[in-house]
Image (tube, rainbow, N blue to C red):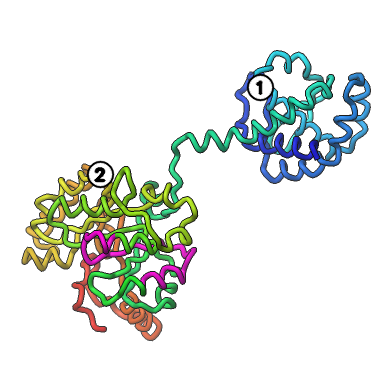
Amino acid sequence: MAGTLIVLGCQIVALMTPPAAPGSQTVVLIGPTTVVFAALAVNLLILSLLFRVGGKTDATFREKFNGLGGSARVATTGFLRSFLTIFALTKERKSAAEKLTFPAPWLYYPGSLSRCVQYKEMSMFMRRLALSAVVCTMIPWVAAAQSGTPKIYNTVKLKLKEGKQVVGGTVSSPDPDVYCAMANSGFDFTWIEMQHSSLGYQDVARMIRACKGAAAIPFIRVPDAAEGDIQKAVDIGALGIIIPMVESVDKVKNAVKFAKYPPMGKRSLGGGQYGVMWGADYRQTANDNIMIVAMIESPAGVDIASQIADVPGVDVVFVASTDLGSFSGFKQGEPQYEALTMRVHDATLKAGLKLAGPLAWKNRPGYTFFQGPGETALIRSGAQAALTPAGPPTRKSGVAPIEGSEPK
């Protein structure tokens, strides 16, 4: 049993140890993961041989080693190289180095070059080896926990960080089957519409839960930046909060405050299905995964675009094409309208945030986050494509549709 634990610990350390630099005195084993675990099975069989050699001569060890089959010799080499790695991590570096030396021949381990090592007085180190195996197995996990690297499961955030564009499908129907069809159709996220629909939080909770594990990340456009709306949205599992009609900096600050846990915000810790959706460590990882999208829909919002973009915790600034035209009185393509969009464009990118708009603006420079069509529009266009696949386009390319104007 002790031998099994030792070998297992050694192989885990070997798997997690980076390759030694050329000329380095530290010997490490790094090969393909599959090869390492295949060698583990052989190591378990030959472990008793290794420990029974203790106290005998080098010649005895060489004789037994050379008598092993090819695969067993490779596995033994891997084990001994892992053994050296463990001793390189202990305080007894000098003593260990004196006990273990390098002879010829060389053995080729798939994916890397391993060296056979001579065996001397291994029995004297059995206890130290067992303790070192346990300690060294824990080191990578402790280091990872202390490294401060956030755990990111919001794939929208990851894609944006990589410079990719993301598209969300708009969902207004409470039917879980419709939601799952949207969530698994290739969209990066779902834009769950709670501002301009009769959807309730119980409806949305069922929809999100029905599609746990879907590729599309749930984003919710809440009715307002009120604490109750945002709290419910994140509690049911939304990883994106879309704030409509932003015309004050305080509105955005409130969105961040109610969506994020302390110390970044003041989100209350309560019940919900967030743990089922995103894991038992959700409290520790939520702040790094929840995104805030601020929608600028009027000239008043445009006037404070730079201040909105400077609020800590905001990830995306969205130019709402329909309402910007409705509130300004200008149409897409007109110089006055485009001047408004450019002011938001410049302020957002200058702050290092992501710029968003309707899917029709996908080819506009700087835009990476888009609201796609709703389920009814997709059903209609899908039916039209099926019936008349070569039909002419219904509107000018690059012009976003006016929300509410399309037939139902």
Return the residue at label 1.
90
Kindly identify the residue that appears in the image at 42 percent across and 50 percent down: 283
Up/down of 280 relative to 194, above or below: above
Disc 1 is placed on an element classified as loop
Residue 42, position as x, y percentages in the image? 82, 42
Viewer-proximal residue among 24 and 131: 131
Number of callouts: 2
- Badge 2 amino acid: Pro
Residue 331, position as x, y percentages in the image? 11, 66
Separation of marks 2 and 1 at Cα, in angstroms? 44 Å
Instruction: Give the magenta-colored segment's residue range.
Output: 204-230
Q: Quadrant of the C terminus?
A: bottom left
Up/down of 69 relative to 252, above or below: above
Residue 399, position as x, y percentages in the image? 21, 67
Kindly identify the residue that appears in the image at 30 percent across and 61 percent down: 370
Disc 2 is placed on an element classified as loop
Return the residue at label 2.
312
